[in-house]
Amino acid sequence: MENLTISQVSRMYDVTPRMLRHYEKLGLIKAGRRQDYAYRMYDEEAVRRLQQIIVLRKLRLSLKEIAILLGDTEQGESLRLLQGRLAELDDEIESLTLIRKLLKQLAGRLGECRRRQTQFDLLEDAELAEVARVLAFPKTNIKENASMEELNRAGEILDRSLQVRILRLPPCTVASYHYIGENPDEAVGEVMTRFVQESGLYEKKPDARMYGFNHPNPGVLENGIHGYEDWVTIPEDMEVKAPLEKKKFAGGLYAVMTIPFPEFQLWENLTRWVNESPDFQPDYSELGEEIMGGCLEDHLNWVYAAHNGWKEDGLPGQIDLMLPIKPRER
């Protein structure tokens, strides 16, 4: 097998270059470089290891857990890890089974009311009213009712998967840099890091934020490369020099979900939440894939980390995924 470029591997396995570089940083895969070629190259061993990572991610293992599995030569720790994950999965299955049972019971009560042409009231049903009481007052002592305790535990297990909040971003002034080519997010990040450090931005605006987005998305350009653009919020009277550009961001209404870096596949979860929301619908930019539909990635603590020279501070890497929305049309 011939060595593959980062772009080839990205297209072949549907893994972003940003994710591949993160895997390298964690020591999960290794890339080399040819003397006559400036970009990363992946040999057969690296590709095979990537395939294993992809499979393990689909099995819902974290990158930390995957590192243990791939590095545990004696396999004892790996066995304990998988046994623990199996126990967690059993809890989820039990929780889903209980919730399904209660929903089926609720549907039966509702169907009976429809046949009788009576108005259904959850609180008039003795059994379901107890469920509602516990859900409405989660701190209630429910030791006397084991099924209610199980239901609360089920909710805790299942609700951890998706937390979406609604946020209105105010208008602001930003310093922008846009690059199209190999590893665009990395190239943009280097330029923005220099800007933050040389301008003393953190001292002037300690609440500065860094927003990023594909520009354009992967797959838009025929040559396989894509672009990335970063915006760093700045004081309105601050001037910026080329290659940066000063812009005005109009702000807007967004559905927001915090993810650990670099779990960008969770964009699908946020998109599904908005599409299924009874109150909101997407409000994508007319430029569409050219600027990621107007979606933003808010890199939390980025300005402080850049100001601090990217020293290890123990803070987890987190990103707010931000999808533009508007009230759903009735």
Image (tube, rainbow, N blue to C red):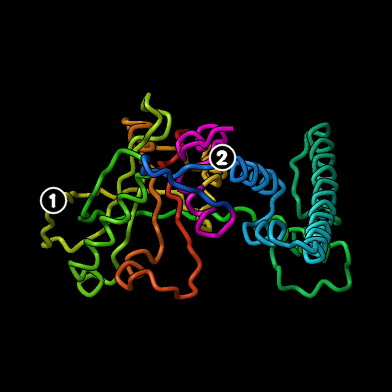
Image quarter where the N terminus lies is: top right
- Predominant SS along the magenta part: helix
Task: Report which residue position mark 1 lands on.
Answer: 242
**Spot occupied by residue 94 in the image (x, y as percentages of width and height):** 85, 54
Q: Could you tell me which residue is drawn at 33 percent across and 71 percent down?
A: 309
**Spot occupied by residue 195 in the image (x, y as percentages of width and height):** 22, 61
SS at badge 1: loop
**Mark earlier in primary sequence (1, 2):** 1
**Spot occupied by residue 114 in the image (x, y as percentages of width and height):** 78, 34
Along the viewing direction, whichever of 269 and 43 lies nearer the viewer: 43
* Extreme-front residue of the structure: 35
- Residue 330 located left or right of residue 192: right
- Residue 324 located left or right of residue 126: left
Residue type marked 1: Ala
Residue 167 in magenta stretch: no
Q: Determine whether 150 is above or below 114 in the image.
A: below
Along the viewing direction, whichever of 51 and 116 lies nearer the viewer: 51
Residue type marked 2: Arg
Q: Could you tell me which residue is drawn at 50 percent across and 37 percent down?
A: 10
Q: Determine whether 159 is above or below 106 in the image.
A: below
Which span of residues is magenta-colored? 1-28
- Residue 175 located left or right of residue 68: left
Along the viewing direction, whichever of 276 and 218 lies nearer the viewer: 218
Crowd tier of the residue under label 2, counting other residues whose Cα lies within 10 Å: few below 14, some 14–19, many 20 or above:
few
* Any part of residue 273 in sight: yes
Task: Report which residue position mark 2 lands on.
Answer: 272
**Spot occupied by residue 134 in the image (x, y as percentages of width and height):** 76, 64
SS at badge 2: helix
Crowd tier of the residue under label 1, counting other residues whose Cα lies within 10 Å: few below 14, some 14–19, many 20 or above:
few
Q: Could you tell me which residue is drawn at 74 percent across and 48 percent down?
A: 121
Q: Determine whether 170 is above or below 77 in the image.
A: above
The label nearer to you, 1 versus 2, is 1
